[in-house]
Image (cartoon, grey):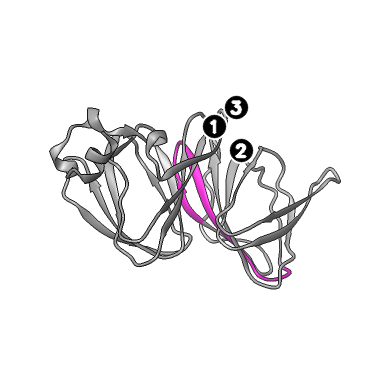
Amino acid sequence: MAAALLAADPQSVTPAQAVPVDKEPQHHLVFENEYTRVFSVQLPPHSQTLLHRHDRDYVYVTLGPAEIENDVLDKPPRQVKLQDGEANFVKGGFAHVAKNLADTPFRTVAIEVVGRAENDKPADKAERGLELGHGAISDLVADNDEVRIRDIQLAPGAMSHTDTPTLPHVLVAITDLNLHDEEKGGGTREIRIQAGGQLWMPAGATPMRTNRNKQPARYVTVEFK
């Protein structure tokens, strides 16, 4: 059945024949909790996924530039060029085939919205292009009722700080990260992950965060409201 679905034109099959996203061979579950399921996706050059369903809303973060064709069931195929670190929120409830048109692997992280944080009040809307400190910028990519997506960049040695509490979130490294966090309560934390890695971060006070690398640091956070 998998081989048949792979070869089939997605417009010639029905939603019932599409495999769930967690059964699609190129989607590898990294971790899951009450808020999310996180999948690492790597599609070899000039290959395609099986026809698969995205039943939940999700965020994708692209790792490296890419050129793909998105064949959504019952819609015309659409070719898309993506940039390194590009992040977007997608409403679920559809089936599609993703085709890699490039000579390089297509790598992305898919972050499903499974649950919501139980806040006493709705999270405030964030500001776009918020300055976090000298050499530190947080760019607001999306802010809706489910998630807040930020693209954060720190110059070498730069330190970020804001008094806004953080929501529970997934951090996706766009570059190799060597970050040092200092919590308000006196604790410290080291974040050392390679580009493409993911890390779950619980809700809490915003730390004073320093980039200890000699290169700029960039990462995307997906906060759950």
Q: Amino acid at mark 2?
A: Pro
Q: In the rendered structure, which disc, 3 or 1, sits on the residue that comes first in sequence?
A: 1
Task: Please tell me how crowded label 3 is: few (under 14), some (14-19), or many (20+) other residues with Cα within 10 Å.
Answer: few
Q: Which residue is mark 1?
A: 35
Between the residue at mark 1 and the residue at mark 2, the CA separation in whole angstroms equals 8 Å
Which numbered tag is attached to residue 168?
A: 2
Instruction: Give above or below for 141 relative to 116.
Output: below
Q: CA distance from mark 3 to mark 2?
A: 14 Å
Give the x, y percent position of residue 159: 73, 63
Which label's residue is closer to the chain start, 3 or 2?
A: 3
**Tag in front: 3 or 1:** 1
Name the foreground residue: 109 vs 219.
109
Tell which of 30 and 110 is nearer to you: 30
Q: Does residue 192 appear left or right of residue 69 in this picture?
A: right
Image point 27% across, 42% down: which residue?
A: 96
Q: Is residue 25 left or right of residue 80?
A: right
What is the three-letter code of the residue carrying label 3?
Asp
- For the N terminus, which image quadrant? top left
Q: Magenta residues, as a range?
A: 140-157
* Along the line of sight, the residue nearer the viewer: 141 or 113: 113
* Residue that label 3 marks: 120
User: x, y percentage for residue 52?
Assistant: 31, 38
Q: Amino acid type of disc 1?
A: Tyr
User: Viewer-nearest of labels 3 and 2?
Assistant: 2
- CB-based contact (under 8 Å), mark 3 and mark 1: no
Marks 3 and 2 in Cβ contact (< 8 Å):
no
Q: Point out residue 28 in the picture as x, y percentages from the top left corner.
A: 47, 42
Asked if marks 1 and 2 touch (Cβ < 8 Å), the reply is yes
The answer to whether 57 appears left or right of 68 in the picture is right
Label 3 and label 1: CA atoms lie apart by 17 Å
> In percent of the image, x 45 and y 53: which residue is there?
108
Q: Give the vertical position of 197 relative to 3 (above or below).
A: below
